[in-house]
Image (tube, rainbow, N blue to C red):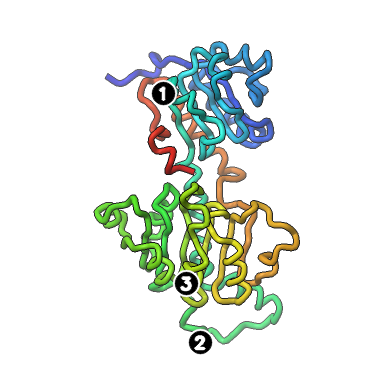
Amino acid sequence: MPTTPAARRRPRAAVAMKPDAAAALLDNHSLAALSEVCDLAPLPVLDDFTTDRARAVLADTELLVTGWGCPPVDEAALAAAPLLRAVAHTAGSVRGHITEACWERGIEVSSAAAANALPVAEYTVAMILLSGKRALERARDYRVERHRDDWLATSPEVGNYGRTVGILSASLIGRRVVELLRPYDFRVLLHDPYVSDEEAAALGVRPVGLAELFAHSDVVSVHTPLLPATHGLVSRELLESMRPDGVLLNTSRGAVVDQEALTEILLRNRIRAVLDVTDPDTLPAAHPLWGCENALITPHLAGSQGNEWRRLVDLAVSETERWAAGDGFAHPVRRERLAFLA
């Protein structure tokens, strides 16, 4: 029998994240929504679990609502929080604060990675479409020349009809990109060694090897998490194998790509790139990538920002309500899957 709203228990909850993250995420609407489903400890948020106030709050906290900058929930924090049983994270990766001690206690963990995947996927699809029309380059030329080119003489390489898009990794974001690409006339390839041929068929993509993905795609979109096994995965050899004027689109992590090789190839004007991430996150002012007119570099803006943050909190509210009702998290983080997550 489903739990009725009147019978739902309101767990004691606290918010743990950086104060500036809380200021961005937790507007009055979000705080009111959280307070509807749990007994929320008064602000300010916890950003240090070692203070007297933090220990007093943690003493009867059953669920933590966490965000960017949450301190590690380690053995000392857990000792101060004997009733803690769950964490609802309002961002993607939990690696920064969920420790082995949490799993040992059996803490249930939820992440808003699925909610954060949508704006990244939307950005990716937008850039695929814009790169196919060469919209940004042609807008730049139009601003300089101030007259229209002959549209009947447009190169047959311009356009999005029948282009091949290669997806590197069927991550949450990669899968969402595949879903959003379905209405378009693209051929979609996928490289992910953990996806079976049957699952790829269900996704509507053709599974290929890594070399084939790069050699046969007009756009390669990188969605693999940064793990020891994926550091530098997009190598010089793969980049050199791309079709002339092909596009590398990276919304994952900069270090997944051999950035030195990418820079050299871009400077030769052989391929194009859309980079929402670099290594380091902010390139030095003198880095040659800044001077590559065939590279669009954006400041890690693909993920949730502005009003999109509310989606993350809405998911945490929904997860808290489910957990309080005894239904478990809809978006759990599994200990055994950590090796494959960002």
- In whole angstroms, how far apart are the C-alphas of marks 2 and 3? 28 Å
Task: Give me the disc on residue 152.
Answer: 2
Q: Which residue does the numbered mark 3 point to in the structure image?
A: 242
Residue visible at 43% across and 58% down?
168
Which residue is at a point 37% across and 60% down the rendered structure image? 190
Q: Secondary structure at mark 3?
A: loop
Which badge, 2 or 3, comes first in the chain's sequence?
2
Q: Nearer the viewer, residue 328 or 273?
A: 273
First in sequence, mark 2 or 1: give its number. Answer: 2
Considering depth in this image, is 263 or 244 the residue closer to the camera? Answer: 263
User: Disc 2 to disc 1, how far (Cα)?
Assistant: 60 Å
Q: Between tags 1 and 3, which lies in front?
A: 3
Residue toward you, 232 or 133: 232
Numbered-mark total:
3
Return the residue at label 1: 323
Decide: few, some or many residues near mark 1? Use Cα within 10 Å; few <14, some 14-19, many ≥20. Answer: many
For the residues labelled 2 and 1, say whether their Cβ atoms are less than 8 Å apart. Answer: no
Disc number for residue 36: none
Q: Position of residue 23 (x, y in %)?
A: 67, 33
Q: Identify the amino acid type marked 2.
A: Leu
Residue at image location 48% in from the left, 27% down from the top: 100
Q: Between disc 1 and disc 3, whose residue precedes?
A: 3
Q: Quadrant of residue 309?
A: top right
